[in-house]
Image (tube, rainbow, N blue to C red):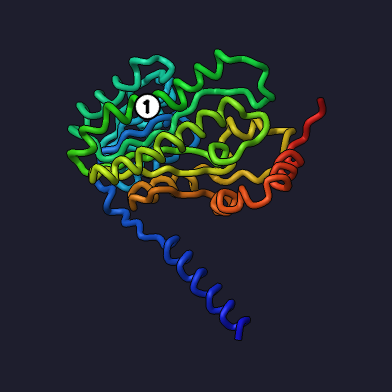
Amino acid sequence: MKFSTKIVALGVVTALVAYSWRDTFAPESLQGAKVLVTGASTGIGEQMAYHYARFGAQIVITARRENVLREVVERCLELGAQSAIYIAADMSNTSDPERVVRFAVEELGGLDYLVLNHIGPSPFTMWNGDVEHTRWLMQVNFLSYLQMTSAAMPHLEKSAGSIVVVSSLLGKMCSPFVAPYSATKFSLNGFFGTMQHELAMQRKNVSLTISILGLIDTQSALEKIRGYTDMKAYPASEAALHIIKAGATRQRESFYPLYTYFACLIRDWFPFFRDLVIQNSYNFEP
């Protein structure tokens, strides 16, 4: 009897998980949507721009390299975007985040989605005491997100729009060689997790999605980890589509690939063994 009860309970839990993970995304919901995507010259941001284009959105993309942005815009128009334009910006420049939002709102006539994806370069190495690099990275990876959110919020309130924050498992669990980067992602999760509560308490009709990503096969990520680990990297195009769907269905938190969800779920169960596994996942010789 007890065994049967456990089987039933397991079945119920499995059904609830399956229900919560069902795909309710409606592609037509993005037709004509006014979207700003940051960090869109390469990697996940570039792939998100292409997916939004296929769904017929109106897109503004931004990154530092104007020549690459021009090529991405051309491809977006080929894929079916209602409109696609770019603005080059450097998020380490404290005036650029607000400038980009103003440009997008003026060009699009409003804003439905603010997709925050950009990151600054950071070495994959043990921290060497460089405080200035960490300070610079906090501006690019964290503070600029806050600046853009603040500038976009009045427009998102008018459209009942969405903020999509691209974060990382490294902002949920500590790992070697990424101290400055991990600090910025922990900051994102903490700030925007708090903001989710505040938006709900104020009954503002603006959704906020935090997407937690594992290792993705972008060129920059693969170059950094080469020789350090044999962990599997997952496709950037799939990660980009996952993020878009999560934002469009107004999920509070999403995980890609699936192992990131279970890693967060059990991260504090056996901390000694967790840390042992993490440390043994990397090749390092002092």
Q: Is residue 23 above or below residue 89?
A: below
Q: Residue 10: horizontal and vertical position, in percent?
A: 55, 73
**Kind of residue sitting beneath label 1:** Thr
Q: Residue at x 44, y 27 (%)?
A: 142
Between 63 and 202, the one nearer to me in the picture: 202
Looking at the image, residue 26 sits to the left or right of residue 261; the answer is left
Looking at the image, residue 228 sits to the left or right of residue 49; the answer is right
Between 66 and 91, the one nearer to me in the picture: 91
- Regarding residue 24, the answer to whether it shows in the image is yes
Hey, which quadrant is residue 146 in on the image? top left
- Regarding residue 82, the answer to whether it shows in the image is no
Looking at the image, residue 189 sits to the left or right of residue 70; the answer is right
For the C terminus, give its image quadrant.
top right
The residue at the far bottom in this view is: 1
- Disc 1 is placed on an element classified as strand
Q: Is residue 179 above or below residue 80?
A: above
Q: Is residue 7 above or below residue 20?
A: below
Q: Residue at x 51, y 17 (%)?
A: 135
Between 106 and 132, the one nearer to me in the picture: 132
Residue for badge 1? 62
Q: Residue at x 40, y 60 (%)?
A: 23
Q: Residue 52: horizontal and vertical position, in percent?
A: 35, 43
Q: Residue 204: horizontal and vertical position, in percent?
A: 23, 43
Q: Residue at x 76, y 41 (%)?
A: 280
